[in-house]
Amino acid sequence: TTASQATDRATSAEQLLAEAEAAKEAAQAQMTQLQGRVTEMNCAAKARKALDKELSELKAKAAECGKLRKRAADLEGKLKEAEKAVSTAGDKEKLLRERAERRVEELLARAVEETKQRKVAEALVAQGQKALQA
């Protein structure tokens, strides 16, 4: 039974290691998703800069034309929305990055523990085999 239990432990450790690998792949997928969000954030920042430039040009002409004043006010609203979008994207990116980092740390710790358990189980199996041979 000791050899049987050791074999069961080794099998369990192998299953845990497989689960850890799957979780690692999921964490890598999250990192890929994070990279996509960073790209979105960069696009939003570029859009913000473009809107800021257009707003500045319209403010210079606003003194001459009432229609241009209204357009400038509209662009200010869009600029605030773009700034909010950039801020929100940054917050999401930071949160996802922190989650992914924590998950990777958890997976590494779990893999180390599982490796230790597997080695103990292998040692027990070896002892059991020696005992059976003796």
Image (tube, rainbow, N blue to C red):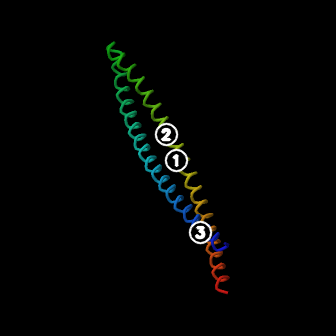
Q: Amino acid at mark 2?
A: Gly
Spot occupied by residue 43 in the image (x, y as percentages of width and height): 38, 39
* Above or below, comparing residue 32 to residue 128 in the picture: above
Q: Provide the residue designation for mark 3.
A: 10
Task: Between label 3 and label 1, give the one nearer the viewer.
Answer: 3
Q: On residue 53, which mark appears?
A: none
- Is 68 situated left or right of 31 in this image? left
Label 3 or label 2, whichever comes before in sequence order: 3
Spot occupied by residue 60 in the image (x, y as percentages of width and height): 36, 22
How far is mark 3 from mark 2, CA to CA?
44 Å
Spot occupied by residue 101 in the image (x, y as percentages of width and height): 55, 52
Of helix, strand and loop, which one carries label 2? helix
User: Based on the displayed image, in which of its 4 quarters is residue 4 positioned?
Assistant: bottom right
User: What residue lies at 64% left-to-right and 76% top-to-bottom?
Assistant: 123
Task: Between label 3 and label 2, give the one nearer the viewer.
Answer: 3
Q: On residue 90, which mark appears?
A: 2
Residue density around tag 3, few if under 14, some if 14–19, many if 20 or more, within 10 Å: many
Label 3 or label 1, whichever comes before in sequence order: 3
Residue density around tag 1, few if under 14, some if 14–19, many if 20 or more, within 10 Å: some
Residue density around tag 2, few if under 14, some if 14–19, many if 20 or more, within 10 Å: some
User: What residue lies at 48% left-to-right and 52% top-to-bottom?
Assistant: 26
Label 2 or label 1, whichever comes before in sequence order: 2
